Each structure stands twice: as C-alpha cells, then as structure tokens.
C-alpha cells in the first residue's frame, strides 16, 4: 500500500495543475478587445466620424476591435446583419422599416444617428454658371439604386421643384457610377465625397448643387444592429456609440492637419487638399450633428419620404418608433459626458 501512495500523490498533483491551468485559461483577459464585425454602406468622407474613431483609437479605448468591410449598399448591409456576417452596419435607417414590415424572424434597430443631411452632390457635364433645377428637364442623371436614401432624396427634390421629364439611371452599382459618367453616359451625376471632388478636379464634371442643402434635414445614415444582438450585447453597443460620438466631437475641434492625417489611411490615392475640401463641404451643410439622436420628427420625415417615393404604403407606417429605434445608448452617452 505504501508503494502505491507516491504514484497516487503524483497523479493527484498533476490533475490539480491541469485544473488550475484550465481555470486560468477561462478567465477573461481584461486587455483583450471585443471583436465587432462592422459593415459600412460605401466608403465616403460622409462617414468621417467613424474613420476618426478608428484612427484615433476611440474604439480601442472602449475595448473594441472593429473589423470593417464595405457592403456597397444599405440593402447588402442589412442582409449582412440578418445573415450574421455583420454585427453592426452603417446603413440608411429605412432598412429597419423595410425589415420590420417583412414580419420575419429578425428585426433591425437604429441605435445611433450619424448623419442628418443627404451627403451627395449633383455634378454636371457642362459648366452651368446659374444652375436651376429646371435645367434637369429632358436630361439624364446617373443616380442611386431604387429605394436608397440618395435616390429618394433626388426624387423628392425633383417633385418639390416640379421638374419633369428627367431620366434617372438607377441600375448602376455604386463603384461603376463615376466611370460610366466619364465614359460619356449621362448629363448629370449624383456622387458622394471624395469621388465628387475627384471628378471635378480632373475636369470631367462641375459642381451644381448640394443635395443635402436642397432637400434639408434628413436622417440619412444610421448605425443599425439586429434586436437580438442589441439585447445580448448592450455593453458593446454602448461602447460603440460612445466611440463614434467621441469621433464626431474630435472632428469638430481638430485642426486641418490632424483631420487630414486621420482620414488619409482610409482614402488611398486621395490628396490631403481633396479630403479637407470634402470635410469642409460636409461641415458647412451641417452633416454631423453633435446630438446623434434619431428624433420622432426625423423619423416622421423619413417615413413620409418613403411614402412619397412609393416604397412604403401609408397603412404600413411604423406606428411605434421604438419598434425599430433604440436611442437609449445615445442618451446614456450624454449622461456620462
């Protein structure tokens, strides 16, 4: 029996070491960042606060690692959320209404409003010194896909200005639009920055109007996640919202050199001057509100635009805004400032 005690003690000691190591491995590393799969609708300086939050380390300060990809469309960004290939998407808030009305297993909720104006600009092939909306009559405009925010803003502006007989091309993918225009298609084109300024600088187009200024206040782009993801990851959503809010604040107070340095890594091949010019255009039209809250008034404007454009029936308006919007995280960010 005495001979058996030593091997038994060695075996017990070995088991204790293994169990201790296993317990140690199960402990959360406080320095480890939580990974967030993020999908942006397109790459544009229109979303500068987000890139600032990445380049200035605001997400990492919150304990988040943001793995970003570009979906090239709000419809694709919403589909990524439903499929689970994205945790958070930067898309048009109308997607939450579309998905809600499909009565499927999953719903989407807006939790942070990034932009409060449309971010596209109208360019012309020929120089127009005194542009009038009636100049579009009988002309062709390269625009965005049907049901997208910029397409609806364009259509609603044409209705408001009572301009008829305008052919708006809506079947081109976003990356192909500028190339189609420079190849000779269309008399006008609707583009975001910095692509718009790049075309103007190359002498291929001329600025004629800001769609954001022409249309007015509009909640164009929001951070959205599934209701389930928000419910199960409130801490991540709060931290994400905090980081973006800090990005917006930084952008409004930073120097031009600091802004250019922060954005350059996301726009390879774009000059510092073009980046700053693009930022200045968006700032002047009041694109980035320091209050990232989607209000009831903005939500009503959004639904009225959807109805006007025939993508939402009046009978299908979302009666309870909270069914597709959760602004609690924005409000919590304010309380912690």
Image: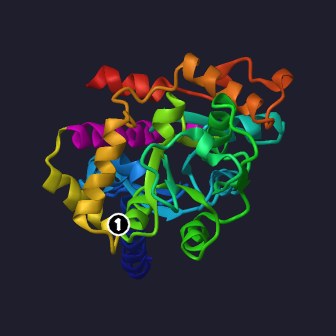
Q: Residues within 10 Å of mark 1 (few under 14, many from 20)?
A: few
Element assignment for label 1? helix
Q: Residue at x 56, y 52 (%)?
A: 87
- Image quarter of the C terminus: top left
Name the residue carrying label 1: 201
| Range of magenta residues | 230-252
Q: Is residue 296 above or below residue 191?
A: above
How far across and how far down the image is residue 272, in percent? 23, 64
Q: Is residue 129 visible?
A: yes
Q: Residue at x 61, y 39 (%)?
A: 153
Residue 199 found in image quarter: bottom left
Q: Residue at x 33, y 58 (%)?
A: 32
Q: Is residue 114 above or below residue 138?
A: above
Q: Is residue 43 left or right of residue 160?
A: left
Q: Is residue 259 magenta?
A: no
- In this rendered view, identify the residue nearer to me: 36 or 288: 288
Chief secondary structure of the magenta portion: helix
- Image quarter of the N terminus: bottom left
How far across and how far down the image is residue 113, in percent? 48, 34
How far across and how far down the image is residue 159, in percent? 69, 32
How far across and how far down the image is residue 231, in percent? 59, 35
- In this rendered view, identify the residue nearer to me: 164 or 47: 164
Q: Residue at x 71, y 53 (%)?
A: 168
Q: Is residue 233 magenta?
A: yes
């Amino acid at each position: 029996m005495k001979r058996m005690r030593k091997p038994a003690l060695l075996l017990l000691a070995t088991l204790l070491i293994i169990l201790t190591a296993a317990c140690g491995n199960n402990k959360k590393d406080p320095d480890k960042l939580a990974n967030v799969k993020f999908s942006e609708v397109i790459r544009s300086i229109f979303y500068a606060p987000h890139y600032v939050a990445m380049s200035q380390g605001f997400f990492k300060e919150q304990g988040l690692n943001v793995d970003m990809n570009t979906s090239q469309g709000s419809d694709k960004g919403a589909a990524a959320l439903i499929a689970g290939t994205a945790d958070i998407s930067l898309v048009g808030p109308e997607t939450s209404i579309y998905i809600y009305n499909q009565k499927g297993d999953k719903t989407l909720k807006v939790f942070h409003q990034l932009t409060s104006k449309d971010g596209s600009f109208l360019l012309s092939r020929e120089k127009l010194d005194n542009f009038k909306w009636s100049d579009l009559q009988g002309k062709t405009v390269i625009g965005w896909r049907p049901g997208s925010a910029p397409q609806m803003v364009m259509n609603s502006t044409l209705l408001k200005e009572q301009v008829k007989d305008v052919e708006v091309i809506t079947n081109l993918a976003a990356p192909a639009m500028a190339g189609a225009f420079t190849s000779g298609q269309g008399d006008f084109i609707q583009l975001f920055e910095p692509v718009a300024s790049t075309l103007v600088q190359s002498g291929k187009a001329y600025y004629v109007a800001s769609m954001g200024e022409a249309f007015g206040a509009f909640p164009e782009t929001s951070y959205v996640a599934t209701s389930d993801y928000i419910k199960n990851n409130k801490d991540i959503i709060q931290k994400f919202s905090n980081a973006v809010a800090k990005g917006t604040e930084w952008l409004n107070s930073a120097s031009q050199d600091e802004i250019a340095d922060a954005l350059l890594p996301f726009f390879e091949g774009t000059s510092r001057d073009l980046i700053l010019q693009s930022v200045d255009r968006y700032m002047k039209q009041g694109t980035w509100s320091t209050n990232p809250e989607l209000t009831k008034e903005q939500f009503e404007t959004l639904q009225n635009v959807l109805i006007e454009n025939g993508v939402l029936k009046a009978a299908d308006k979302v009666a309870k805004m909270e069914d597709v919007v959760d602004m609690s995280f924005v409000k919590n960010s304010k309380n912690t400032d």
